[in-house]
Amino acid sequence: MIGWEFPPFMSGGLATHCFYLTRELAAQGVEIDFFMPKTKEPVSVPWMRVIQVDYSSFNEFGTKAEFREFGPYYSFCKKQARQGSKTPAEKDEARADPVGFDFFGAVRKYNCLCAQLVELYNSREPYDLIHCHDWITFQAGTEASRACRIPMVVTVHSTEYDRTGNLWPFDWILGIERSGTAVADLVLTVSNRMAGQLEKRFGVPKEKLRVFYNAIDAAPFDRKARREEFGFSADSKIVLYNARLSIQKGPEFFVRAAAKVAEKEPKARFIVSGSGDLLPRLTEMAVELGIADKIKFLGFTPFEEVPLLYAISDLYVLPSVSEPFGITVLEAMASGTPVIVSKTSGVSEIVKHCLTVDFWDVDEMAAKMIGVLRYAVLHDEMASNAKPEARRFSWDQVASETKWFYGEALARGVAHA
């Protein structure tokens, strides 16, 4: 399996998906080597071998290679540290340090090295197939599949159209997505909405497409927490946003709706959890809209701390412009937190006990937020129904479906020359 992120190094649902899917696949007898970029701190889990790719990764094969720190998450950590700089000297040093900004260069380098490393491991103990996650791994999978002469399957969690709100997609990324899904033996995706997009935009034949929805591991979402620990009064009404701060996820619509809610509900307070390029604009908006004292921007929340946010929140809102699935919706529901989600989300295909809105309709969004916060009967009814509904979607079922998917790919007997 080839990935780009894995907890604790993560930026969204792809890492969560890989964590739980591999754990349950291993429990069902699938042996996995998980390839991912090198991180500053090593990544290790008991159910599979995690192989972190950089130049030093070739040393055990007797290949001479200069050791270099490589990997987007090493860069990501440095960038996060720089963003936290406090003194003028630290800020000047941050501006002078370019590490972490050559994203496309890092992707090319990772894919090239990863393909070579997969081939070397395959020469020792042959693999049955390769499973790639999203465009960022497709080139490595394609080259390794050809070199090893084994099938390749891919999971498409999102496309460049989704990530950019269909406003300014990069042709280079679209080309990789199009070619990767074309050469893959089978294509797995996370919602019917996503499958339709792959068929329409990339010409993926229906017979190659399979839809397996994401799921939830309910255990971490039984956490309890006091809102005072986060600096809120006990009687405050907390509305949470937890996603990347990018155009795809619609955080600007959340902030605009929050301002309307604050006018009607004086005890309403808002949490924005996540990092991304829209953070400066969002903080400016909070000031312009007069809610800077009622909204907290937490930055990126670590994997293990996210359940605490749901535990203290009265409502979770995900107003994505384009959301292939939306694992955080299941997380909130499993915590017993009522949810409002945009109609342009894959998760809305499978859950009933949530409210839906058009992402752009901030008046309607605010009205529904106020309704949940103001009327205890509505809040409690949504919470009590959401919890058991979300917990029906289990990762062991997803793993069973994925095993069948692997078997189908192998049964087709498709091998590259």
Image (cartoon, rainbow, N blue to C red):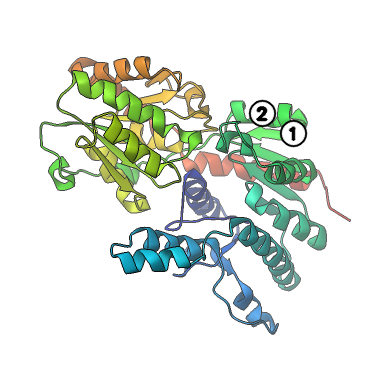
**Which is more toward the observer, 89 or 36?**
89
Quarter of the image containing the C terminus? bottom right
Residue drawn at x 79%, y 62% is 148
Q: Is residue 334 left or right of residue 45?
A: left
Disc ID at residue 202: 1
Q: Are marks 1 and 2 in contact (CB under 8 Å)?
A: yes
Q: Residues within 10 Å of mark 1 (few under 14, many from 20)?
A: some
Task: Residue 283: give x, y in percent of width and height.
Answer: 32, 40
How packed is label 2: few (under 14 Cα within 10 Å), some, or many (20 or more)? some
Kind of residue indicated by mark 1 = Phe
Distance, label 1 to label 2, CA atoms, is: 8 Å
- Kindly indicate the quadrant of the structure image that contains residue 29: bottom right
Instruction: Name above or below for residue 252 compared with residue 148.
Output: above
Looking at the rendered structure, the kind of residue marked 2 is Gln
Going by the picture, which residue comes out furthest to the left?
234
* Relative side of 326 to 117, left or right: left
- 161 or 210, nearer to the observer: 161
Q: Which residue is mark 2?
A: 197
Q: Earlier in the sequence, mark 1 or mark 2?
A: 2
**Element carrying mark 2:** helix
- Observer-nearest residue: 295 or 35? 295
Q: In the image, residue 85 lies at what x, y percent?
A: 33, 62
* In the image: residue 364, left or right of residue 67: left
What's the residue at 52%, 46% (across, down)? 14
Q: Position of residue 132 (x, y in %)?
A: 65, 51
